Amino acid sequence: MLCGHWHIPWVWRLNDMLVISAGTVCSSKVRGKISQCYNLIEVDAPESDCKRWHLKVYRVFSKGEKEKVVDSII
């Protein structure tokens, strides 16, 4: 599940579901010590009939730095 508008980037697992919240890329209303950022999501299926997917989520900050926050097979 993807969500946002908290201006806080957050990732947590709820049972078998990942909840991924984006930060904010253009608002100056950031919370705490987190700077402006957005999520970059990559999904790869090793084969066309594959039922499992490789999910990677990166947090990308305003100066271009990238931080991997999810690397999971789903």
Image (cartoon, rainbow, N blue to C red):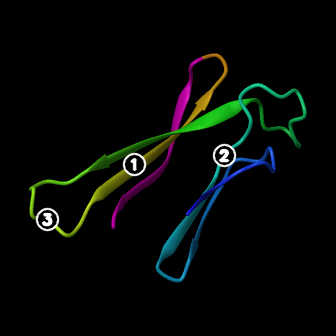
Name which residue lies at 26% across and 60% down.
Answer: 53
Residues drawn in magenta: 64-74
Q: Quadrant of residue 71?
A: bottom left
Q: Earlier in the sequence, mark 2 or mark 1?
A: 2
Instruction: Check contact, mark 2 vs mark 3: CB within 8 A.
Output: no
Inter-mark Cα distance, 3 to 1? 17 Å
Residue type at mark 1: give it.
Lys
Inter-mark Cα distance, 2 to 1? 14 Å
Would residue 41 be counted in the magenta stretch?
Answer: no
Left or right of 63 in this view: 15: left
Inter-mark Cα distance, 2 to 3? 28 Å
Nearer the camera: disc 2 or disc 1 = 2
Compared to residue 34, the image places residue 13 above or below, namely: below
Residue type at mark 2: give it.
Ala
Location of the C terminus by quadrant is: bottom left
Closest to the observer: 2 or 34? 2
